[in-house]
Image: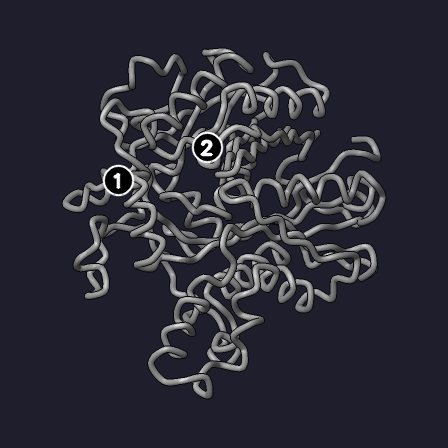
Amino acid sequence: MTADHVLVTGLGATTPLGGDVASTWAALLAGHSGVSAIEEDWAADLPVRIAARLKVEPTEVMDRVQARKLDRCEQIALIAARQAWEDAGSPEVDPERLAVVIGTGSGGALTMLGQDDILESSGARRVSPYTVPMFMPNGSAAWVSMELGARGGVHTPVSACASGAEAISMALDLIRLGRADVVVAGGTEAFIHAMPIAGFAQARATSTRNDAPQQASRPFDADRDGFVTGEGATILVLERAEFAAARNARAHAALAGAGITSDAYHITAGTQEGQVRAMRKAISDAGLEALGIGHVHAHATSTPQGDLTEAASIAEAIGPHTAVTATKSMTGHLFGAAGAIGAMSAVLALRDQIIPPTINLDKLDPEVKLDVVSGQARQASFRAALANSFGFGGHNVSLVFTTTP
C-alpha cells in the first residue's frame, strides 16, 4: 500500500434486512427479502402499499430522550456511524484530521411533513422547537460529527439516489488531498410516507405488486414493473493507509477509485453515455483496466428502462462476462443510502470472495446481456469490484474497491 491508498476499516448499517452489518450481510447472502405490506390506515387508498422497512426500530437501540430530538434519518445515521466507528477500533485521531460526509436524498422529510400537519391542525405554538435541526438535510452528518468530535469538515451531498456513493467519493478526495486522515462517510434515508409513495406511484416508478411484496423488486427480470421504497443507513470509516498501518488497523478492503459524471439530459432518465463515463473514470482512477473488475454491484432499481440502460452501460464499460448482482431485489431502494449499502456489499463480497444473489430473477430480460448472479450466492475469486449509483437529475457515481495485501 502506498500513501495515497485509502482503506475501509469500519462498516455500520441498519437496513430492512438487519440492525447491523453482520445480520444484513447474512440475509443478503441467503437471498432474503425485506419488503412487506404497509398495513397502516394511511396507506389504505394508495396505489402502492408495500415498502422495505427497517428490520430493527431505532428506538430499540437508541436512548429515547435523544431519539425525540432527531428525525428518523438522523437516528439511523447515528446508529450506523456508531457501529462503523466501533468496527474500526475507535481510531484515536486529531479532531482536525477527522471529517464526516453523509449523503441523503431528502433529509428529514418525515419531520417536515409531520410538523406541517401539526401546524395546520393545532397552530404554530405546537410545532416542535427541534423542527429545523430535524428536517435540515445536513442534520445527520452534523450529529455524527458532534458525537465523534470531528472538526475536519462536515459535508452533506444531496444527489438523489447517488448521494451515499458521492459521499464516499468525497471522502476519498479529502484523504487524497491531505485534508483528513479519517473520514466517516455514507448515506441515510427514511421517508416511508404517503406523500413520496404517492408521488413515485403517480410517476409510475414503483412496483404495484401489493399482493406479493417479497416478489415485487425484481431487477433485470423480464416482468419487472418498478422499484420498492426502502429505508436505512450505511456508514463506512475510511482511512489513509499510512495512518491505518500506524495503528495496526484491520481493513475490509481498499477504496481504489471513483468516477463522477453528469448527464445534463433529463430530470429522471439516465444515459448510457454518462454511466459508461463514470465507470471508466473510476476504473482508470483505480489504476486498473476493465478486465480487472471481477464483480459489479449494479444500481439496478427494477424499473423497466433504468435496468436496460445500466445493463448496456456495464456491458460497454466492463464487458458482458463480469459477475453482476442487484441487492435492491432484497433491500428495496434506499435512495440516499443506496450507494452506501451498495458500496458495503461490494466491500464484503471482496472480503469474503462471495457474491450475493439477485432474487426474483425468474426470467432474465433478453435485452440484458450480462452474467447476473441469481438463485443463490456465488463463490468467486476476484481482486476488484465496482459499485454503481445513479440518481434523478443525471448524477452518476461509480466506486472501485480492491482487496488489501
**Callout 1 crowding tier (Cα within 10 Å): few <14, some 14–19, many ≥20:** many
Dot 2 amino acid type: His
Foreground residue, 115 or 138? 115
Above/below status of 62 relative to 104: below
Foreground residue, 170 or 56? 170
Dot 1 amino acid type: Ser
The outermost residue toward the left is 211
Q: What is the x, y in percent for residue 178?
A: 85, 44
The residue positioned 46% from the left and 49% from the top of the image is 22
Residue that numbered label 1 is attached to: 207
Q: Quadrant of the C terminus?
A: top right
**Callout 2 crowding tier (Cα within 10 Å): few <14, some 14–19, many ≥20:** many
Q: What is the x, y in percent for residue 378?
A: 40, 25
- Mark 2 residue element: loop
- N-terminal of the pair, mark 1 or mark 2, is 1
- Mark 1 residue element: loop
The residue positioned 20% from the left and 49% from the top of the image is 47
Q: Quadrant of the N terminus?
A: top right
Residue that numbered label 2 is attached to: 299
Question: How many numbered circles does the render carry?
Answer: 2
Above/below status of 115 relative to 228: below
The residue positioned 68% from the left and 18% from the top of the image is 288
The quadrant in which residue 175 appears is: top right
The outermost residue toward the bottom is 125
Q: What is the x, y in percent for residue 392?
A: 48, 38
